[in-house]
Image: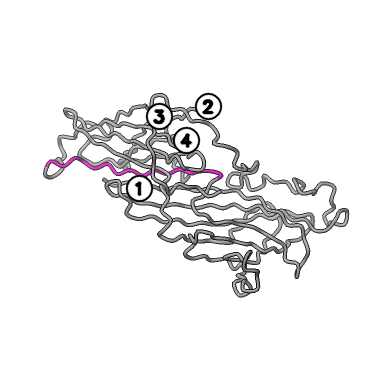
């Protein structure tokens, strides 16, 4: 098992479809013994990670590229490996723990490897079984829509979108597609709860971050940023567990957490001295501590969008294979 760590700031990170739209269930993981359950299953984890290393796939890896000359004459036909990186960004705003807005946007990037010394065009096929996509826009530098040709596809196998894609062969990933999902897709990967309490001449803030047990994989690289109002002395900060960092220029506290497994929760506490030189909140209200959480989830996505590739026989018969790496990133803002 892997143990979560709350440590000093390492830097601000932006860090099958998930079923995170279901409601959070309760979990009883105590913060003092917070242990991740480890892998939730292999779920076809890729050995390459385009989000970290765009050159991780070598030209001769997989699909019989070994021993094949650059012209392809030493072996049978043209072979193409299309590495696709699917990234979805979820941005959501909460007011008093109720969602006020939510948006999911996705980007597809492709890298092409082949046994020939030129780029090989291919069809990029997108299926949207739950009709999550509200709008989609191809990068006209690398992709052309085949919407007019979809009517000729058999009804049983007709995709929702199809594009011809042509990118240079090499190590680089090229953005070919961007889409935005509709308002009916409202995933909830995490839940954030804040409690503020007065203790003598101090304000104590307790944060609880809960991970949806239906998340497809662990949340990683969590950055929690809490805004601090002027009624307290930021430099008097003490945190439990230790690790919160005071940023005087932005009047915020920052924590970094390495990992949070599905259904798990952890608690953070911050304690500040009241600043006697600053007027207190009107009508005796408690001071407000807004929270921003950023994280990512590898090998997972939020929509039900499906991606496939195939050759374009009218241009060139080729053996076209695909590897897909998925990730979603979350920006969750909570306002009291």
Is 292 drawn above or below residue 177 in the view shown? above
Residue assigned mark 1? 333
Residue assigned mark 3? 29
Disc 1 vs disc 4: Cβ atoms closer than 8 Å?
Answer: no
Q: Which mark is residue 30?
A: none
Q: Residue furthest front?
A: 156
Colour mode of the rendering:
one colour
> In this picture, which residue range is highlighted in magenta?
284-299
Please report whichever mark, 2 or 4, sits nearer to the chain's N-terminal start: 2
Q: Secondary structure at mark 3?
A: loop
Q: Which mark is residue 1?
A: 2
- Which marked residue is nearer to the observer: mark 1 or mark 3? 3
**214 drawn magenta:** no
Q: Nearer the viewer, residue 157 or 106?
A: 157
- Image position of 120 (left or right of 185): right
Residue assigned mark 4? 261
Residue 142 visible in the shown view: no
Determine the image quadrant of residue 260: top left
Residue density around tag 3, few if under 14, some if 14–19, many if 20 or more, within 10 Å: some
Query: Measured from the top left, where is residue 141 in percent x and y?
Result: 61, 67
Q: Nearer the viewer, residue 97 or 270?
A: 97
């Amino acid at each position: 098992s892997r143990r979560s760590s709350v440590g000093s700031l390492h830097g601000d990170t932006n860090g099958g479809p998930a079923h995170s739209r279901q409601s959070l269930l309760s979990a009883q993981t105590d913060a003092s013994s917070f242990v991740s359950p480890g892998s939730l299953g292999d779920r076809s984890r890729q050995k390459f990670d385009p989000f970290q290393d765009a050159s991780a796939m070598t030209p001769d890896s997989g699909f019989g590229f070994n021993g094949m000359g650059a012209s392809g004459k030493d072996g049978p036909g043209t072979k193409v490996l299309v590495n696709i990186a699917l990234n979805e960004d979820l941005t959501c705003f909460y007011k008093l723990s109720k969602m006020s807005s939510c948006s999911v946007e996705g980007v597809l990037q492709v890298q092409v490897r082949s046994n020939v010394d030129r780029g090989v065009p291919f069809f990029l096929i997108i299926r949207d079984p739950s009709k999550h996509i509200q709008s989609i826009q191809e990068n006209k530098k690398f992709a052309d829509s085949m919407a007019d040709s979809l009517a000729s596809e058999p009804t049983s196998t007709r995709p929702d979108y199809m594009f011809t894609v042509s990118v240079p062969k090499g190590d680089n990933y090229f953005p070919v597609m961007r889409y935005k999902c509709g308002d009916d897709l409202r995933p909830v990967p995490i839940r954030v709860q804040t409690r503020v309490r007065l203790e003598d001449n101090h304000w104590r803030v307790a944060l609880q971050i809960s991970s949806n047990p239906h998340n497809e994989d662990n949340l990683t690289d969590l950055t929690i940023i809490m805004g601090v109002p002027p009624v307290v002395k930021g430099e008097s900060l003490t945190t439990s567990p230790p690790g919160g960092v005071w940023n005087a220029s932005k009047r915020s506290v920052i924590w970094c957490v390495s990992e949070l497994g599905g259904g798990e929760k952890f608690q953070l506490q911050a304690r500040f001295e009241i600043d006697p030189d600053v007027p207190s909140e009107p009508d005796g209200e408690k001071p407000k501590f807004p929270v921003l959480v950023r994280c990512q989830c590898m090998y997972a996505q939020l929509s039900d969008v499906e991606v496939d590739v195939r050759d374009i026989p009218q241009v060139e018969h080729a053996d076209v294979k695909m590897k897909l790496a998925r990730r979603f990133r979350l920006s969750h803002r909570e306002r009291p």
